[in-house]
Image (cartoon, grey):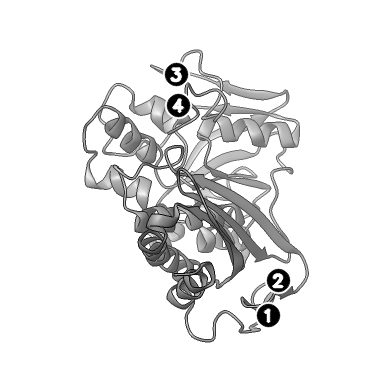
Amino acid sequence: MTEFDLIRDLLTKVNQPGRANAATDVSGGGAVWLGPGDDAAVIVGTRLVMSTDLTVEDIHFRRSWVTFTEAGTRAVTAAASDLAAMAATPVAVLISLAVAPEEAKAVLSELGDGIKIALDEIGAPLVGGDLSASPGPVFMDVTVVGAADEPVTRTGSHVGDEFWVTGVLGGSAGAVRGWQAGVEPSPNLRAAFVRPKARIEEARWLAERTQVKSMIDISDGLMGDARHLAAASGVRIVLDPSLVPVHPDLSTEHALLLAMTGGEDYELGFMSPPGLVAGCAGDFQDEFGIRLTRVGHVEEGRGVEVVGDAPGVEGVTGGFDHFSAPDGSC
């Protein structure tokens, strides 16, 4: 098949009829005016929120661990999680792919199945991208476009604010640790890695019902992302390890370390004034089936401080870093 045959097949697979060119208003005023098929897509609206996320085979996933369908879903979800962090509504997605020519048709078919799952979940069309041959691993570069009247940023934390997280942490890192040790992770840990959820609806719910001062998606680990929030607002974040919601399937001595530093959980970490979130935590759990947990607070100063007993976390200062890992891979 030619390059353009492959592109047309992928677009037909992932986009629901009419969705790719539907100029439908969404929260924030964004809409797709022109979808795929031209030199560029056209998006209308104000306060558009954009982000991009790169997924590389053998760095972010391994084909011995997951299927390409799962890798496609995960790549789009990871990018969309950045929109969730800003309480933005997804509007459109662009994906650039590089695959080996001899396996392009089969790999793109599987990736397309996974991409469609993620697009259906976030409610946005694929409006463009690029396709290239690759002499080596599979590359996926996902760009997401969202809209928000009042985007939530990383700045805005104040002394006295409470630090809250959604869901449980460490599951994705627990799956990776199992695979690296030659052990198949439990179904729940595996699901945490291959089927994370972009907390789009959860973020908007929180932004509408609580005073979310700053927010981030937990992709680099709780400690690493807390450091990002602290730096953006010029404050010190104090974390209490005894409060961290550890994934229940993590039963090893490294459970707390994985929950605090593992990353790629794609839960939300956010700041809110004292007492506001606790009053609606029950409603949140009823609505979304996951809990809210207060894990720390904001003080004057800089950086992140860990208080109390934190076995296995002593001396750890941040989360995952591609250029600090031994080989840069998962």
The crowding category of the residue bearing disc 3, from other C-alpha atoms within 10 Å (few below 14, some 14 to 19, many at least 20), is some
Q: Which mark is residue 40?
A: 2
Above or below, comparing residue 33 to residue 226 in the picture = below
Q: Residue at x 36, y 41 (%)?
A: 62
**What residue sits right under mark 1 in the picture?**
34
The crowding category of the residue bearing disc 1, from other C-alpha atoms within 10 Å (few below 14, some 14 to 19, many at least 20), is some
Q: Residue at x 53, y 36 (%)?
A: 220
Above or below, comparing residue 24 to residue 245 in the picture = below
Above or below, comparing residue 107 to residue 268 in the picture = below
Q: Are marks 2 and 1 in contact (CB under 8 Å)?
A: yes
Give the mark nearer the N terminus: 4 vs 1. Answer: 1
Q: Secondary structure at mark 1?
A: strand
Circle 4 or circle 3, nearest the eye: 3
Circle 1 or circle 3, nearest the eye: 1
Circle 2 or circle 4, nearest the eye: 2
Circle 2 or circle 3, nearest the eye: 2
Q: Identify which amino acid the numbered label 1 is placed on.
A: Leu
Give the mark nearer the N terminus: 2 vs 3. Answer: 2
The crowding category of the residue bearing disc 4, from other C-alpha atoms within 10 Å (few below 14, some 14 to 19, many at least 20), is many
Residue 273 locus on image (x, y percent): 65, 44
Residue 119 locus on image (x, y percent): 48, 68
**What residue sits right under mark 3 in the picture?**
313
Q: Identify which amino acid the numbered label 3 is placed on.
A: Val
